[in-house]
Image (cartoon, rainbow, N blue to C red):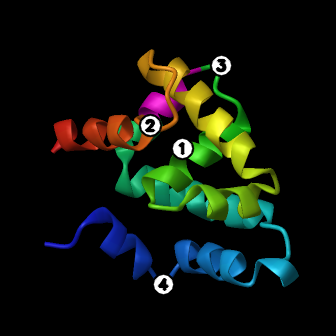
C-alpha cells in the first residue's frame, strides 16, 4: 500500500502542477484561483475529516487553510513558501498558529502528525 506522500508525488493533477511551480520557482507564475480550487477539491475528496475540521474552525485564515492542505499533501516548508509567496519563517508561524487553533498545541512541528491522525481515525 502506498503512503500519502507516495500517492501525492504521483498524482497527475493539481499536486503535480504545484510541484512543477515550486521546481521552477524563479520563473514561477503565481498559483491561480483555479489552482487553489482544484487543490481544495482534491483535499475534500482525499481528506474529508480534515477538511471538515478546517471548515469548522472559523478563525482559520486562508493562508492557514492552504498551508494545512499543502502540509497534509506532503509539501515542505520551502515549497509552501514559494507557492504562498511568503518566507519560510512565515510558513513556520502559520503552521504553529493553525495547530494552536485546530489542536490546542502551538507547535509547527506536530501539525502534520495531528492532521494525519484525523483521517486515520476516520478509516
- How far from the left and from the top, in percent, is residue 55? 54, 30
- Image mark for residue 111: 2
Quadrant of the snapshot with the N terminus: bottom left
Q: Is residue 29 above or below residue 91?
A: below
Dot placed on the residue nearer the N-terminal end, 3 or 4? 4
Give the residue furthest to the top. 104
Q: What residue is drawn where x is 18% and y is 36%?
A: 121
Dot placed on the residue nearer the N-terminal end, 2 or 4? 4
Relative to the observer, which residue lies in front, 89 or 38?
89
Dot placed on the residue nearer the N-terminal end, 4 or 1? 4
Mark 2 → mark 1, Cα distance in angstroms: 8 Å
- Image mark for residue 12: 4
- Image mark for residue 59: 3
Q: What residue is drawn where x is 55% and y is 80%?
A: 16
Q: Nearer the viewer, mark 3 or mark 1?
A: 1
Residue 62 is drawn in which quadrant? Answer: top right
Q: What residue is drawn where x is 76% and y is 55%?
A: 84
Q: Nearer the viewer, mark 2 or mark 1?
A: 2
Q: Secondary structure at mark 4?
A: loop
Q: Is residue 48 above or below residue 31?
A: above
**Is 54 on the left-hand or right-hand side of 114?**
right
The magenta region covers: 52-57
Q: Secondary structure at mark 2?
A: helix
Q: Is residue 83 above or below residue 20?
A: above
Residue 9 is drawn in which quadrant? Answer: bottom left
- How far from the left and from the top, in percent, is residue 7? 33, 73
Pointer 1 residue: 68
65 inside magenta stretch: no
**Is 101 on the left-hand or right-hand side of 36?**
left
Give the residue furthest to the front. 89
Q: What residue is drawn where x is 44% and y is 33%?
A: 52
Amino acid at each position: 500500500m502506498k503512503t500519502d506522500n507516495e500517492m501525492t508525488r504521483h498524482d497527475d493533477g493539481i499536486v503535480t502542477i504545484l510541484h512543477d511551480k515550486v521546481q521552477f520557482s524563479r520563473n514561477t507564475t503565481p498559483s491561480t484561483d483555479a489552482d487553489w480550487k482544484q487543490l481544495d477539491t482534491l483535499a475534500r475528496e482525499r481528506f474529508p475529516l480534515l477538511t471538515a475540521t478546517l471548515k469548522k474552525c472559523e478563525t482559520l485564515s486562508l493562508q492557514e487553510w492552504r498551508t494545512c492542505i499543502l502540509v497534509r499533501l506532503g509539501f515542505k516548508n520551502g515549497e509552501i513558501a514559494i507557492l504562498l509567496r511568503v518566507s519560510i519563517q512565515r510558513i513556520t508561524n502559520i503552521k504553529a498558529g493553525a495547530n494552536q487553533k485546530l489542536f490546542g498545541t502551538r507547535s509547527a512541528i506536530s501539525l502534520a502528525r495531528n492532521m494525519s491522525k484525523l483521517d486515520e481515525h476516520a478509516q
